[in-house]
Amino acid sequence: MASVPGRIQSIERAVAILRLLDAADQPLELHEIADTLGLARTTTHGIVTTLRELGLVNQIHDNGQFHGRYDVAEAARVFGRGGPDPHELRSLAMNWADSLAAQTGLAVTLGVPTRVDVLVVHHVFRPDGSSQQLAVGQRRPLHASALGKALLAFASGGVRRLQGMDLAKYTTRTIQTHQELKDALTAVRHDGFATEDGELEPDRGSIAAPVQGPGGLAVAAVAAVGRRDELYDRRGQPRSDFVGPLMKTARSLSREVRRLW
Amino acid sequence: MVKELVVAAIDQGTTSTRCLLFNHAGRMIAVSQREHRQHYPRPGWVEHDVAEIWRNVERVVPDALREAGLTPDNLAALGIANQRETTVIWNRQTGRPLARAITWQDTRTEPLVEELAVTGKADLIRDVCGMPPTTYFAGPRLRWLLDNVPGAREGAEVGDVLFGTMESWLIWQLTGGPNGGSHVTDVTNASRTMLMDIRDLRWDERLLKTLDIPAAMLPEIRPNATVYGSCRTVVPGVPIGGALGDQHAALFGQTCFAPGEAKCTYGTGAFLLMNTGGRLATSPHGLIPTIGYVVGDGPPVYALEGSIAVTGSLVQWFRDSLELIDTAPQIESLATSVSDNGGCYIVPAFSGLYAPRWHPDARGVVVGLTSYVTKGHLARAVLEATGWQTREVVDAMNADAGPGLALTRLKVDGGMTANHLLMQFVADVIDVPVERPFVMEAVSLGAAYAAGLAVGYWADLAVLRGNWHRAALWEPKMDSDHRNLEHDNWNRAVERTYDWVRPT
């Protein structure tokens, strides 16, 4: 993840790690931090060790026995608060989201993470003149939406968070086990985008990519939403002419967000 | 491979000059921008250096082409939308401006306009231009320049000094400048000079005489979508096919082609224009009857215009003067932290109240303060002020537009359309659906549309209408009892602004 010119990359990464640990419900392992932020393990270890020595990160210990798990120290909690204002995010995303919808013919949504789900902060109609309702202010489940999976994979402390998560069933295709979700998130981190194929509503689907702030932490996700049969080919793969523009939009938004925040 | 053809729009605005490229589907494919300096030589005076603006045009057009990976060969046509009523005079031989342009924000012509009113010229001006004399118009600014700039009047009388609004200046430069440049204007810009007969679309001898303006310096008045000439510089060979004042361009870009269709552009202020068809409306409520647009040899399409002086600038005041937010979009976060206005209303009559109330001695108020009111309620009141001011203009329009032309939906554009709370509130208080199209750059799109129509890049208005796609829709949700109660509260708040400034 390229740094904003004039900023010190290692400080951006350190802040991203603090925010990630603060957002996670449970302490995270080193590799979980590294994978979520797309950092090398050695780099991550160096930053985490420094933060621990400075008293901003705790290493978890039970009965004097140290584990390779970390959480954020009380002194550093302030770093975990905030993120870009969702309305500011919408304001800077408008042209990009409009353009993505025009290019793909799909509806576009922008979501930000909450503690328990995804809040839709922006919605562009699909440009076909059909009757549509604004989804701004609606919630999306983390495990059953592309927005949610993209945010889980790149922001919310990864698999650690999942163990206590309620996997409500919306359709026969909704992910129902924590292992399945864990595997799905690994794939999301590998591909750089998340898919949802009839998992929230039977005939609809979405693909989403993270909007990454400084240090690689996702502060939002952008999704293209449509019918399953238009999003996915016969082999169940998302159509590349949607994935390409989506990823490009997410990268452009990430660039804008890092300028803002 | 078939050569990709696009249309360029130059948006010559108050703070910057931009070039946008649009493809056949009406999608924006590139944009470039350069800001220019604002000159404030005295309180109330605001000037632009038009040589600087011309240099910016020479840069932004190639910049936009470069961004899109295109060359001038890819341009089917070029259109211009411009800040209205900004007044330029220049020398035909040298191409040099005689003075900086006097912009639309400049109030130096107040005494001149008052004099016109007291010397009994108001009726003539209202009859010919559709509107009593005001400082809006370019004509009095031109008169000021002729009276105050050395050599201007003498040069104008012998045909060496030319007058134009911004589109005239740019078209003249683009088509060759001193070497045979076309000295033309379009009907929408000409309608804002106070010199043109709004019915027959010609310069009016009586008004020229009243303001003592030599006819030799005036540009030829042309339709909005017509070939004005070919560029001889910047993009040589490309036809200039369109020119409109910015708000008329937005009406065109929003494809408000049928009587009753209306758009509102929300920026620092807001401009609501409604198409009134072939009928020139009169407005007892003080809206401005104006030209909507003229396509080729077609008849003029008229419009009613209502402007709101303070909308986005109230949010800026909340940010910069009260420092309650860091950025403008944050006002929505603050406003959504509470569920209603807490009984608080803000009326931003910062420099009086304009259409449809016309109380120049009013000043702004914040009313309904109790210990319950927080900054969240103030944020709501700020946004609601834009909603209620829109309602007042819509009410006036519905009353004056003519039989059967009541507003049934409102197309919106401009930066404030990013604010969902505001757009929902506008829909709630005007009680018709509010819709936002995909291309928020309605001004530039309108200029491109006019230019593309003139050269046959787009076949007709129906094709353009087909390019309009809804990106968001806000349906009215407020129940009518609540709306009526809030409207009454707003009206009572507005009444408290009247006559605050004591007569001197």
Image: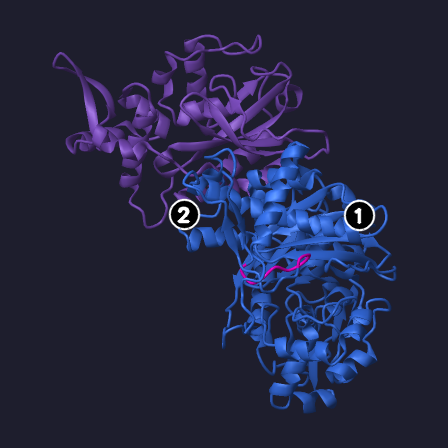
Chain colours: A purple, B blue
Q: Which residues are magenta?
A: B350-357
The reply to whether the magenta stretch includes residue B351 is yes
> In the rendered image, which quarter is residue A58 located in?
top left
Which of these two is toward me, B333 or A240? B333
Q: Which residue corresponds to the image point at 60% horizontal and 75% vertical from the top-left?
A: B101
The percent coordinates of residue A170 (x first, y second) are: 55, 11
The percent coordinates of residue B338 (x first, y second) are: 47, 34
Q: Few, some or many C-alpha atoms within 10 Å of disc 2 (few <14, some 14-19, many ≥20)? A: some
**Looking at the magenta stretch, what is its main secondary structure?**
loop
Residue that sits furthest to the left in the current view:
A64
Q: Which residue corresponds to the image point at 29% horizontal and 36% vertical from the top-left?
A: A15
Residue B296 image label:
none
The percent coordinates of residue B394 (x first, y second) are: 71, 48
C-alpha distance separating marks 1 and 2: 39 Å
- Residue corresponding to mark 1: B260
Which of these two is toward me, B373 or A53? B373
Q: Could you tell me the amino acid type at mark 1?
A: Gly
Task: Indicate which label's residue lies in the foreground, 1 or 2.
Answer: 2
Q: Could you tell me the amino acid type at mark 2?
A: Leu
The reply to whether the magenta stretch includes residue B314 is no
> In the rendered image, which quarter is residue B155 located in?
bottom right
Which of these two is toward me, A3 or A168? A168
Q: Can residue B74 be seen here?
A: no
Horizontal side of A29 relative to B362 (left or right) equals left
The subunit carrying tag 2 is B
- Residue corresponding to mark 2: B324
Residue B28 vertical placement versus A181 (above, below):
below
**Which element type, helix, strand or loop, lies under badge 2?**
loop
The subunit carrying tag 1 is B
Q: Which residue corresponds to the image point at 36% horizontal and 17% vertical from the top-left?
A: A161
Q: Can residue B199 be seen here?
A: yes
